[in-house]
Amino acid sequence: MNLQKMFEMQKALDERIIKEKGLEGQDLLPNLILALQVELAECANEWRGFKYWSNDREPRICVIDKKGQTAKEYYKNPLLEEYVDCLHFILSIGNRLGINDSDTICDIHSEYLRTINGSNTAKLFSFLFSISYSLIHRNLDKETYINLFTSFFTLGEQLGFTGEQVEAAYMEKNAVNHQRQQEGY
């Protein structure tokens, strides 16, 4: 997965949005963190595994039509889409904080996985919420951001996503986001 390229693509999208919406000079970090938390909740909702009270706990990984058949016209993975929406905001936060060195993130990723590996998926979602919360209420330091990023990748692995799937979905959604801006979203 080419994180540096994704950081650059996200930076270009963010700069476009800031310019077109007249947001230059505004502190958008609290908005980015809240947006990440909203997307994490949407991702958890598509995962469904925490819903112990429900008989329907299978992840939403494909679109189902009204008759219960998988949509044949296209394949859409709602869980992956929500996961990638989170990634957009994580990249934006890193760019905003100036912590966008993919080599550092990758180096720490392998070490950090040892400490979090084995956590269940529900705990990872909760951990990601707590880390994102700490970005607002603590020092905005590199270690906290890297913990967020590496925990997020661990979550992706537990959800069954490969780096290639995530990167391809990110590229597709980034293009959609640019198109939305062009259409006045």
Image: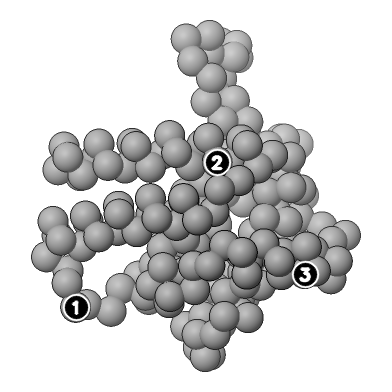
| Residue 25, label in figure | 1
What amino acid type should be assigned to the residue bearing mark 3?
Answer: Tyr
Can residue 46 be seen here? The reply is no
Choose top left, top right, bottom left or bottom right for residue 173.
top left
Label 3 environment density (alpha carbons within 10 Å; few <14, some 14–19, many ≥20): some
Which type of secondary structure does the marked residue at label 1 adopt? loop
Which is nearer the eye, 131 or 102?
A: 102
Which type of secondary structure does the marked residue at label 2 adopt? helix
Q: Can you identify the residue that label 3 sits on?
A: 112
Tell me the residue at 46%/50% (across/down). Answer: 5
What amino acid type should be assigned to the residue bearing mark 2?
Answer: Glu
Label 1 environment density (alpha carbons within 10 Å; few <14, some 14–19, many ≥20): few
Q: CA distance from mark 1 to mark 2?
A: 30 Å
Residue ranking furthest to the front: 103
Tell me the residue at 59%/14% (across/down). Answer: 70
Q: CA distance from mark 1 to mark 3?
A: 34 Å
Which is nearer the eye, 54 or 116?
A: 116
In the displayed structure image, the side of residue 9 where residue 76 appears, left or right? right
**N-term mark: 2 or 3:** 3
Q: CA distance from mark 2 to mark 3?
A: 21 Å
**Residue 147, horizontal then vertical, whole percent:** 66, 72
Seen in the picture, residue 7 relative to 82 is either above or below; the reply is: below
Badge 2 vs badge 3, beta-carbon distance below 8 Å: no
Seen in the picture, residue 6 relative to 22 is either above or below; the reply is: above
**N-term mark: 1 or 2:** 1
Badge 1 vs badge 2, beta-carbon distance below 8 Å: no
Q: Can you identify the residue that label 2 sits on?
A: 167
**Residue 126, horizontal then vertical, whole percent:** 67, 67
Seen in the picture, residue 139 relative to 71 is either above or below; the reply is: below
What amino acid type should be assigned to the residue bearing mark 1?
Answer: Gly
